[in-house]
Amino acid sequence: KAGVTQTPRYLIKTRGQQVTLSCSPISGHRSVSWYQQTPGQGLQFLFEYFSETQRNKGNFPGRFSGRQFSNSRSEMNVSTLELGDSALYLCASSFDRDSPNYGYTFGSGTRLTVV
Amino acid sequence: ELKVEQNPLFLSMQEGKNYTIYCNYSTTSDRLYWYRQDPGKSLESLFVLLSNGAVKQEGRLMASLDTKARLSTLHITAAVHDLSATYFCAVVNDYKLSFGAGTTVTVRA
């Protein structure tokens, strides 16, 4: 069974650029959520999507955005990159909360470095 | 806002001895998760705890949940080197996982 696939694995970008990260969930999972992990702030929630609808959003500036497609794949975009955006970005997929199998599986992450 | 506190943040364990990691959370939730993270890697699911009094065991790890006290524990029995990692607890609320700061475990001979 294929896991959660995140691409690319590594990215180096320059301040001011924008970046798009991709996440393909486990087959059958319709919920995709994104997290940022940094040494200073730990794991922080970015947003969650279910059936192409954003159901919750974390406390991040508007430069961070996301979307979900009809096949449940999700992308997140960060515009006007800042040095502080350097982090490991993790995507998690799950069944909906009413499912008895409700649980979160994480992808391998995208390591973004902003220089 | 849901807050999740773990302690200790760092744990130096001696091989063969037993230790416990604690996870307190501030708001009612119907699920608590434990994850393991190796350096530079993603999060690996260890346990999902669904109800009060739930206890799950896998190898040398055992997790329990007390929803009334809003407390979960991760107990490590007879520590071995390959348990060295960072362990996170997380609580779900409103489609969002809130994580503790993590406990970095180092096992020494």
Image (tube, helix red, strand yellow):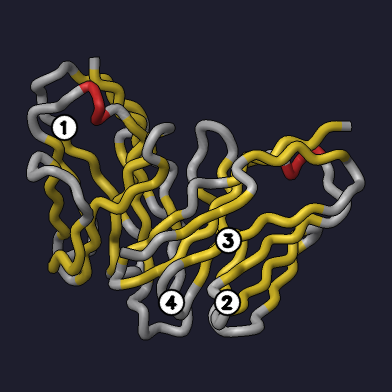
Q: CA–CA distance between discs 3 and 4?
A: 13 Å
Q: Do callouts 1 and 3 point to residues on the same chain? A: no
Q: Which residue is mark 1?
A: A19
Element assignment for label 1: strand
Residue A5, horizontal then vertical, whole percent: 37, 48
Type of amino acid under label 2: Ala
Residue A105, horizontal then vertical, whole percent: 45, 59
- Judged by depth in the image, the label closer to the viewer, 1 or 3, is 3
Contact? badges 3 and 2 (CB < 8 Å): no
Q: How many marks?
A: 4
Q: Which of the marked residues, 3 or 2, is nearer the chain's N terminus?
A: 3
Res B52 quadrant in image:
bottom right
Res A29 quadrant in image:
bottom left
| Residue drawn at x 64%, y 59% as measured from the top left | B22
Q: Which residue is mark 4?
A: B29
Contact? badges 1 and 2 (CB < 8 Å): no
Type of amino acid under label 3: Cys
Type of amino acid under label 1: Val
In this view of the protein, which residue sits in the foreground, B55 or A17?
Answer: B55
Element assignment for label 3: strand
Q: Which residue is mark 2?
A: B69
- Judged by depth in the image, the label closer to the viewer, 2 or 4, is 2
Q: CA–CA distance between discs 2 and 4?
A: 12 Å
Type of amino acid under label 4: Ser
Element assignment for label 2: loop
Q: Which residue is mark 3?
A: B23
Residue A94, horizontal then vertical, whole percent: 38, 67
Which class describes the residues within 10 Å of circle 4: few (<14), some (14-19), or many (20+)? some
Q: Do callouts 1 and 4 point to residues on the same chain? A: no
- Judged by depth in the image, the label closer to the viewer, 3 or 2, is 2
